[in-house]
């Protein structure tokens, strides 16, 4: 049910399985920001998050066969591991804190992966940032994300070539990232 | 269906569109890892799983050694005692690879794993190595095999590709012997992956092509070994898929298979590149091998029928 890995994912995976260190470097450089952001979001501690990022990439290098490009994309897989590790970390911290206090308070369960959503204030900031995008970029983003259109459907509705829609979405995402980065942790 | 069909369907925890949008924006962000992050990562990974040599004629063998090691890294304690092939457990299979590798190591003057070499022959060497590994922790067998493989790659790196060596008594250039080791390591990794239930990606197309080329050049030899007379005839072999290609193969061991340039042939064989390499390696039945045959189909069938002749255990 999840999307399959891209051709690029497959080639990088082949090379990592074959012990090609430069392929690991490529994956690292491409996906570091995402993996860090995921870890940071849960732990809210930059040093801890950077350690988690390193662990995630080490895991991929040591056991690359745990990733199966037929079952999902590489970024999704790495993101899942990062999220899990971060949640584990927070849980362990929480446990330590609780036992240090000598309390018998129930441990709060971290939200399961599937239900994970942005906090309301951050979601509002994302929506606000989208509304401030230049018209062409905003339209494309809104169709693709808020209304769940495929690239092709969005292209038809906008009367534009699919490639143009894709690049507008890309550009829009990049603008959003810049806008939101200023307010990051 | 395809992830390119629409954006953002794949990050975990992102059934919510705004969350998906935020994460996709992070991926698109031009942010780069902080300086030193990659260096720290590589320091960590080099100490846990050594990278493979990626240049020179040993690279495709080194790549398959690394792939086997990734598989072993995912193997549970129970997997190590699973029967994989030839009645061997995973540990015994690794000992078998180390045994066959050790004949190459000895032939090129690299340090030999396991007990001192008694015979330059695969079966008895395998028996000795399996006896040696018996009672040892699997990690030890794995470490011995890997250290020897690394020593072979390192030693080969200082040799001319064409240097003839005769491990197991068969004289070929050292580069071809390493391609034979690549093929066997690959096939046994696939054997183990199938039993354990882990999907194994294929070698890179560059490595696959080198092995396919080796297998194509072996065809006159497999015919000869099987006592089938090629009679001065030639076939065109087209291997499809990444790493494939087309070869003109005179069925005569005194001549060399070359990339096809349209010279006349008696028969044409077209098949999948991976299936062909596996056929040479003794996997798959020649009689039911899926291939498109043209021209002298009896000759083409002889070629396929005899293709596994040089594969060992």
Image: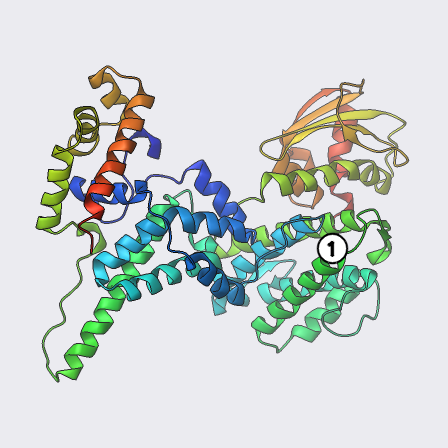
B206 in relation to B80, above or below: above
Residue closer to the observer: B25 or B275: B25
Residue B232 seen: yes
Find disc 1 in the rendering and name its residue: B157
Q: Identify the residue at horizontal 22%, vertical 54% (top origin).
A: A113
Residue closer to the observer: A182 or B288: A182
Residue B279 seen: no
Q: Identify the residue at horizontal 28%, vertical 34% (top origin).
A: B7
Q: Alpha-carbon neighbours of circle 1 within 10 Å: few (<14), some, or many (≥20)?
A: some
Farthest residue toward the top?
A159
The x, y position of residue A145, in whole percent, is 19, 34
The x, y position of residue A29, in whole percent, is 41, 49
Residue closer to the observer: B98 or A94: A94
Q: Secondary structure at mark 1?
A: loop
Split into 4 quadrants, where in the image is the C terminus of chain A? bottom left
| Horizontal relation, residue B155 to residue B185: left or right | right
Q: Chain of mark 1?
A: B
Q: Identify the residue at horizontal 53%, vertical 58% (top origin).
A: B70
Split into 4 quadrants, where in the image is the N terminus of chain A? top left
| Horizontal relation, residue A73 to residue B207: left or right | left
Q: How many marks?
A: 1
B203 in relation to A60, above or below: above
Q: How is the image coloured?
A: rainbow
The x, y position of residue B242, in whole percent, is 58, 34
Q: To which quarter of the image does residue A100 belong?
A: bottom left
Q: To which quarter of the image does residue A139 belong?
A: top left
């Amino acid at each position: 049910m999840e999307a399959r890995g891209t051709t690029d994912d497959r080639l990088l995976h082949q090379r990592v399985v074959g012990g090609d260190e430069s392929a690991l470097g490529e994956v690292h450089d491409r996906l570091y920001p995402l993996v860090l952001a995921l870890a940071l979001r849960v732990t809210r501690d930059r040093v801890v998050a950077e350690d988690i990022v390193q662990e995630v990439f080490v895991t991929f290098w040591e056991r690359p066969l745990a990733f199966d490009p037929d079952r999902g994309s590489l970024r999704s897989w790495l993101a899942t591991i990062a999220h899990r590790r971060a949640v584990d970390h927070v849980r362990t911290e929480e446990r330590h804190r609780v036992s240090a206090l000598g309390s018998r308070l129930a441990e709060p369960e971290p939200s399961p992966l599937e239900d994970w959503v942005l906090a309301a204030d951050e979601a509002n900031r994302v929506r606000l940032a989208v509304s401030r995008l230049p018209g062409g970029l905003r339209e494309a983003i809104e169709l693709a994300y808020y209304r769940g259109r495929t690239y092709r459907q969005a292209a038809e509705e906008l009367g534009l070539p699919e490639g143009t829609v894709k690049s507008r979405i890309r550009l829009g995402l990049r603008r959003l990232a810049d806008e939101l980065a200023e307010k990051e942790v | 269906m395809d992830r390119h069909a629409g954006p953002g369907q794949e990050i975990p925890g992102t059934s919510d569109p705004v969350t998906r949008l935020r994460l996709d924006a992070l991926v698109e962000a031009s942010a780069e890892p902080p300086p030193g992050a990659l260096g720290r990562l590589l320091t960590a990974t080099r100490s846990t799983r050594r990278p493979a040599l990626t240049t020179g004629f040993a690279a495709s063998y080194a790549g398959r050694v690394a792939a086997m090691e990734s598989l072993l890294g995912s193997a549970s304690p129970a997997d190590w005692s699973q029967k994989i092939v030839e009645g061997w457990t995973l540990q015994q299979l690794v000992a078998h690879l180390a045994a066959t590798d050790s004949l190459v190591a000895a032939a090129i003057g690299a340090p030999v794993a396991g007990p001192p070499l008694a015979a330059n022959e695969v079966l008895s060497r395998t028996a000795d190595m399996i006896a040696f590994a018996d009672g040892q922790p699997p990690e030890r067998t794995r470490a011995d095999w890997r250290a020897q493989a690394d020593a072979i790659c390192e030693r080969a790196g200082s040799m001319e590709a064409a240097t003839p060596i005769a491990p197991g008594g068969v004289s070929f250039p050292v580069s071809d012997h390493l391609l034979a080791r690549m093929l066997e390591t690959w096939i046994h990794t696939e054997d183990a992956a199938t039993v354990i239930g882990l999907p194994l990606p294929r070698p890179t197309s560059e490595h696959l092509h080198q092995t396919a080329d080796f297998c194509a050049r072996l065809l006159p030899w497999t015919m000869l070994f099987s006592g089938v007379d090629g009679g001065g005839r030639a076939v065109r072999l087209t291997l499809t898929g990444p790493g494939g290609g087309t070869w003109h193969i005179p069925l005569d061991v005194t001549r060399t298979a070359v990339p096809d340039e349209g010279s006349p042939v008696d028969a044409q064989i077209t098949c999948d590149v991976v299936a062909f390499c596996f056929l040479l390696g003794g996997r798959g039945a020649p009689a039911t091998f899926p291939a498109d045959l043209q021209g002298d189909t009896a000759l083409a069938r002889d070629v396929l029928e005899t293709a596994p002749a040089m594969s060992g255990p």
